[in-house]
Amino acid sequence: MALKYRLALFALAIVFSSLAFAADKEHGTVIAEVPLHVLPDPGSQKLATVTRGRDIFVLDHTMVDNKPWAHLLAVVDVDVERETSRSISGWVPAKVVVTTSTPNGDQVIYGEAVDSENQATIRFGRKHAADDARRLYYRLYEYFPNSPLAGESLWRAADILWHLEKADVGRRPSSHEMDPNMREGMNEETLKLVIKKFPRTKWSDMASFDLIDNKLCGSWKDETKCPEKESDLYEKYAREHPESPKAAEALFNAASREGALVEMFRINNERDKSEKARKKGIELAQEIVTKFPDGDWKPRAMDLMYALQQGIPTYTPEAPSRPSK
Amino acid sequence: MVKHWKKLSLALLLVLSIASSSAADKQRATLIREEYLYSSAGANSQKLSQVNRGTALTVLETSTADGQPWMKVSMAADQAEVSKEVTGWLPGKLIVNASTPNGDMIVFGQAVDSEHQAEERSGRKGAAEDALRLYSRVAELFPQSEVAAEAMWRAADIRWQLAKASSSGTQPVEKYLQEVIDKYPQSKPADLAAFDLLEGKMCPEWRGLPDCPEKESVLYEQYAREHPQSPKAAEALFDAAWRQATLADIYRLGEDRDKSEAARKKAIALTQQIQNQYSQSDWKPRALSLAYKLQQKIVLYGPAED
């Protein structure tokens, strides 16, 4: 009895592990927008459209007229604008399907994601290309977690989502609230996932930099507390992430906020504080010049340093030209 | 004796001409912040007009007012009409000339800042034109600077991009890119300028015919061959490969199977070249993705087979 029980358990374990293995092998996405058909026949009824980067699960394969078809369970858009979707099954030409078993599948998906990201940045690019890119990058991370591209992919997916949400948040009246807690921030979940899954990497450094956005004031209203706090946030970032590609930018953002404080304190007749901010701004700018001699941050820092030394105002009260990140 | 005097006078002439050209260099300057032109030295005098960042100035006179340095300058009255000049006074601290310590970096930094403003949604109006003028001034005022070539290229590129967006077309501004190539041959800025110039040779429309992508593919491949160190070399090869890929579809639709297959093979070979030569950039996975589509015969141009 015990032996039979053990054998049954063993058989069950084999079945489960092979099922899990099959499932692993058959998850994937599509690299081109494609109609989902009722049957493996281009003339059959179209059920929906599967967009790039959508999560798919391959149920079956077949050949029709010497052409491979894949039977999928796919997530499809119900309303693209409202971002609603549902899962349905149907057939697509197998050539657009990339799964975990596709040779170089990670690079194929990544290449299509870069292509979509590029489309999103050009004037007459494909509609919803940024969403395509975001989904494709995420699929790569999800289904090829051991790929050398996984960290960068997850970061890019998170960054695109962050910027799409940032644009949405920026259009709301609450975006001008001084206190960042008074407005709805961007969702931090995916950026925090980058930091958790790929700690102490370039990608986690970049994710940490994006997260600062949620702590910035919507407007300064000529009050010193915002640039003071923001200067501290950026300087702290630069100290904690000295190898980050964003370290120079963070120091510059801190220095430019000190530059704004010079003018704010001067207007408030607080000369000592104004002078202290001026010295701090110059110190930070000098640090950029010394530590980051290559690239555009050095001349930008030198320009700022010159303005601070010459007493050229770098902030206009109640003007839209406040230093931006 | 006569010979000796002749030599001496020649040397004197040379010294004088160097001194005068150096003085002229010092008189040429630019403005690094927007400011009003005043009728006399001092912020309380009459405001004449607004002067933009990067405006080319000639300093005529210096003075002090309210404990601050002021400079009398002349400048073109209008960008389009440089023969007419206006004169007035500007605060000296906003003026950078060839003798300003780190002047090249200060003007370049302000140009980068303006370019950044131009890219932002709520950036300063006219910021792209500010950047263009400031970069131009770096190259003019500081020809020996380490950033002179880069500045000249960036000015030409902004001019090119602005012309592309306008209805006037790019042809009138090609000379600025050509100047970069002539002045800094075999440099990165020259490579980038040559890539921009390729755009001027592209067809506005293909109309589903093979002639244009054929020609364009040749141009891009030639560019990659002639500028192997260019930051745009991988992109040029990708552009060539992508055109060959579309040719495969154009010939397929025209039922010319041999040419379609030849174009497909050529495109795959180009994508392979990108993967081998540029393995550390985004162009490698983009090439790999394109190669995959070509191998799977996914339609890239025209109506899908499905």
Image (cartoon, rainbow, N blue to C red):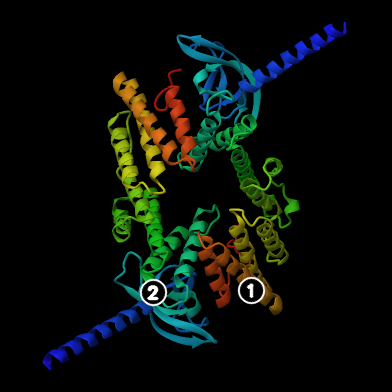
Q: Nearest the camera: B112 or A260?
A: B112
Residue pointed to by mark 1: A278
Type of amino acid under label 1: Arg
Q: Nearest the camera: B271 or B133?
A: B271
Residue in the picture at 30% in, 61% down: B183
In terms of image quadrants, where is residue A246? Answer: bottom right
In terms of image quadrants, where is residue B208? Answer: top left
| Element type at mark 2 | strand
Q: Nearest the camera: A187 or A266?
A: A187
- Lateral position of residue A7 relative to residue A167, left or right: right
Residue in the picture at 15% in, 88% down: B6
Q: Position of residue B233 (x, y in %)?
A: 38, 44
The chain under label 1 reads: A
State the residue lying farthest toward the left.
B2
Type of amino acid under label 2: Leu
Q: Which mark is residue B57?
A: 2
| Element type at mark 1 | helix
CA distance for labels 2 and 1:
29 Å
